[in-house]
Structures are given as structure tokens and as C-alpha cells.
Amino acid sequence: MDRRELLQTAGVAGAAATLPLSLTQNVSQAAVRSGGQVSGLVSGARALVETLQAEGTLCVFGIPGAQGNELWDQMKQRQLPYLLVTNEFSASIMADGAARATGRPGVLCVVPGPGITNALTGLGEARMDSVPLVCLAIDVARGPKYRPYQVHELPNATLLKPVCKAVFEVAHVKQIPEAVRQAFRLADEGEPGPVAVVIPYPLLIETALVHSAPLGPRPVAFDAHAFDRVLAILRDKRLRVGIYAGQGCMDFSTSLVRVAQMLQAPVATSVSGKGVISECHPLSVGWGYGPHATRTAELAFEKVDVVLAIGVKYCEVSTGYYSNPTKRIHIHVDSCAEVLGKVVSPSLCVHADAGVFLAKLLEQETELARPVCKPLVEAIARHKAAEFKEFARRYASHGIDPMHFVLALRRATREDALLFVDVTVVEHLAAMAYTVFQPRTYFNPVDNQAMGWSIPAAIGAQRVLPGRQIVTLTGDGCLLMTGLEMSTAAREGLSVKFFILDDSVYTYMQILQKNAYKRTTATMLARLDYPSLAKALGLTHVELTPGDLEAKVRGILAIAGPVLITVPVDLGKRPIRWIEAVKSRYTRELTAGQKTRFLTRLGVRSVQLRPQND
């Protein structure tokens, strides 16, 4: 027993001596995790760490602060893995990346005030993208120990509420284990999302007798009556079915594929759903099914009578500004009742867990199975071949065509490699052309579109999956948001390969602005000295050059440790289906007066001798 353990034992024994005999007979000298239980006379910090371990926490991401030092010391003492980050924004994103990669709630720990406000953007991304997180927010002193004008004394719990599914405010040490368990449960229940536990820092050093057992089985949604109505529709084999699968299907890939084969249904996915079916499967048609997404999906769904949408929200980005075409029959299945019918107007809503729903369909295989539709499979194969032929066309006049880089990256990486794509115009090219083979290997901040997401998200995933090949697809503007976080990868020896698409402008904004205003505003970036930046952060630097991209990328992936790779790109005039569809949809929704003002402005600016770009 070392000095710390001796002092802790003495402290617990002294506290136990003040308790009634009936209590002390059941008190151990330390908390015991047996079958997931947390019991004993312990400090708040110890109770918190023991509960995190009982809930299977893989890593806690964050920065220690004066209010949280007791907790971080206990994490080290109890050997709970943690990772120091450079900014709490990154802590929330790393927890997000770890959660998406593993399917388990990610955990972050932040101090009050600026720690919480820095993390809000990442929590908002997780909230909108349905990612389970548990945010441990250490608060200022509350209750009897409250004093005015404390450091970081913002309304911390109130700040968290808009971006979290729930916020549990703890007022006593005894409440800590149950609050944490409830947070883990709620984060993963229904539509997943972030949940916060707010703990005033004095509770971390106070002691109490705690006893907390694991919660019972999680309830699983299944509307049997609505399911029977689905069966009645699918029994009519004259109806051609198409499946639109989202992130809710991510852990049920095998069942999804079997259902698709049973129904002979083409399968399209949302962006977040990429990977729920191997995109090499004969029935996989890529993402989306409207003019904004893959041409293969759009053509395959033209002949569909019934859209069976499972575990998908129909968000703005995944639908190309709500461009999905309306079909004769639309069935929407989701574990979250609030999602059903929120964006689209389905013929039938089914409140059901995706896994249970798919399993129940397979139980009816004898009745629902359809013969193999060879013309459908052949048509999908033709459409894919034509599409990839177009992808291979060169549009760049100098540098590297970003689409060619995406294709080379796919060929060079392992099938189970994890790709983290940032908010860049190339995200739409990657969604179309980067073939995904397995669940939880393709990630994008879809709904909140938080720039700079990919770098910390990839680091978070690498921390909890140290043996996996992990790469980013990051724009140079996004790099400016979180680039310093690469120093964390260097410090910890995390072998992420950071591919930076470098053209020194906000290309995405330039495309949007030139279409609408005939000029650009605030889109020019500084040219960085990447070799010096990489050296300063402790990374190897490589600049990718044109020619045999696949071999060069393979060589880069073989380099040990984290690598910063600059990819000088030129998009040229490559058409981007997502942007064209969104522009068309947005234009149709303008009033006559708004269209007149836009056209007048464009007419005047088109004859200006000097475009006013910056």
C-alpha cells in the first residue's frame, strides 16, 4: 500500500467511525466494482471515476482546471484512460469521433465557464448528428458553499441545455453514480445525442456512502400495429421497393443486407449512413436518391413505388436542401418518435428500433421474399460504371484534381480504414466517390457542419482504436480552426494521417458567392509554410505531387506516426451535383421580387471590368 492509499484508507475509516453501526457494518474501505456495482464510502471524484469505469468508458477527453483537478487525479489513480487536448472544442469533437467509431458513448470533461462554452459547438454537432456523448461539466460551488463572483461563474447548466438531450444537475455525492448511469442510458436511447452531468467542484472532495447498480435493460421501441400495416404493403409484390437507410441502421448491417436481398430493393443511404451496406454490394446505389446525390441512386429510385426509410432523419444536407423526390408510398421507421414525419409526410410512420424492425421483417421472409431481379442488378452495375467513368475525368488545369485524390485514397487505404471528412466542397465528392465497405468507417459532420471537425475527431478515434488505419480529408480553411490539435497526435504518438486540401481559399464559399454575387468576399486565406508548421507541431510533412497518386499515398500511409500531408488541389470546373441541386431548389423558392433583385445585381456586376474579390 503506497502513501496515498494509506491516507485514503485512514480517511475513510475516520469517516466511517462517525456513522451508525448498522451502516458501518456494510461499508468497505473502498468502492468495489463487482458486476458493474459501485459501492462504498467514497469521495465524489472516486464515485464518478468508478461509475465511468463500470459504464465501460474508453477514454475521457478534456483539459484539467482548478475545479476539476481532484477528478483528473482520481482518473490517474484508478487508471481510467484520459487524453489532454488543446481546446475544449476539440474535447467534444474527439469524444464524438470516438463514439462514431465505436458505437459507444464518448466522454468529455470540461471546466465551467469557458470550458463549457468552448465545447458547445461540438456538443451541438453531436446533438444534430445523433451521436451519444456524456459531458462531465465540473461547476462552480453551488448550494451552501456558493459565493458570488466565482471564477467561471456562468449559468453553466443553462448553457448546456439547448445542445443536450438532458442536463443532470448533481447536488450531493450520493447522486453522482445514478446521474452518470442515467446520462449513459439516455445518450444512447431513442435518437442518440449528448447528455451533460453538472457537478459542483466541492462535491469531488466530499465523501458519502454510495451504492449504485447497473440500470436494467434499455427499452426498445416497436409499434406492432404499424408493423402489421407495413407487412400488408410489402406483401404486394407488384410494388417495387427502395430502401433509404440512415445512421440508425449502423449496427444492423447484416440484417439490412438480408432484407434488401429479400425484397430485391436498391439501397441508398444518408451521408451519415454510408457503410450500413457495402457500397460494392450489387443492390447498393450510393447515397441519397434525388438530384443532389449519386446519379446511380437517382436512376435506381426512379422506378421505385415504395420508399422504406429506416433510421434516417431527412436532414437538409443529406437531402440536398430537401430535394428528395416524392414517391407513391413512403414508410418512415425510426426509434425516435419526434423524427417521424418531421420533414417529410410519410404514408406510414413506424416508431421502432431499426434492429428490431429488420429482424421482424426477416421473420416473414417466406411470405415477403421476391425472386432475384436480374435487370435491376444489371442496371445498377451499368449506372455505377458510367458514374465512375465520369469521376475519372480530369477537370484540374494545375495541381491535383481532388476527385482523383479521393479515388486514389480509397484504393490505397485498407477496407476497414476510417476516413474523417471535414466541411469542404470535396465532402460532396467524397460522399459520391469514396466507396465504403464496412459500418463505422466513414464520418462527416453532416448537420451542424462544424468546420475543423475532422482533425480532432480522427485523433479521438485513433485514441480508442489504436490499431486502425485512420485518415482525414481536411480543407486548408478547416485546418486553421483546429490545426494545433495535431500536436496532441504528435505528443501521444497517434498515427493519424492528416491530408490537407490546399488551395489557399475557402473554395466552398467562393463557389456559392460567385453564383449569387459575381464576386467573392472574405474567402482568401494566408499561404502557410506547411513544412515549418509540421516541424513545430512534431509531425512529419509530405507534399503530394501529381502522378501515380495511389502509390504515393500508400507510401505516406506506411510512415510511422502522425503525418501532415498537403495536397495542392484545383477543382477546375468539375460539376458538383449537390451544389447544383441545392441552387436549383433554392432558386425555385425565391419570390418574383427576390429573383428580380438577384438578376439585376448580377447583370450590373457582370459588366464590371474588375471583379472585386478578396
Image (cartoon, grey):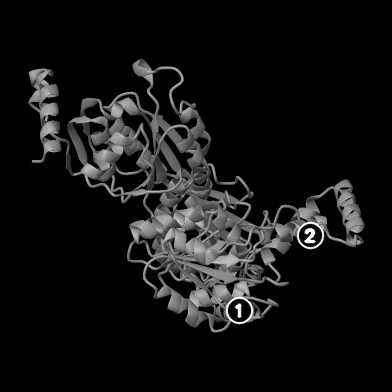
Which residue extends farthest top? 144
Q: Give the Cα separation between the discs numbered 1 and 2.
A: 27 Å
Q: Position of residue 572 (x, y in %)?
A: 71, 72
Q: Earlier in the sequence, mark 1 or mark 2?
A: 1
Q: Is residue 563 left or right of residue 430?
A: left
Comparing 246 with 309, the one in front is 246
Tag 1: residue type?
Phe
- Residue at the spot of label 1: 388
Q: Is residue 576 left or right of residue 56?
A: right
Comparing 118 with 528, the one in front is 528
- Residue at the spot of label 2: 515
Q: Do the numbered discs 1 and 2 sit on residues whose CB atoms are within 8 Å?
A: no
In the image, residue 263 sits, relative to residue 227, either above or below, namely below
Q: Quadrant of the C terminus?
A: bottom right
Rendered image quadrant of residue 29: top left
Q: Residue at x 41, y 60 (%)?
A: 252
Which residue extends farthest bottom? 548
- Helix or strand or loop: what does disc 1 sit on? helix
Observer-side mark, 1 or 2, equals 2
- Helix or strand or loop: what does disc 2 sit on? helix
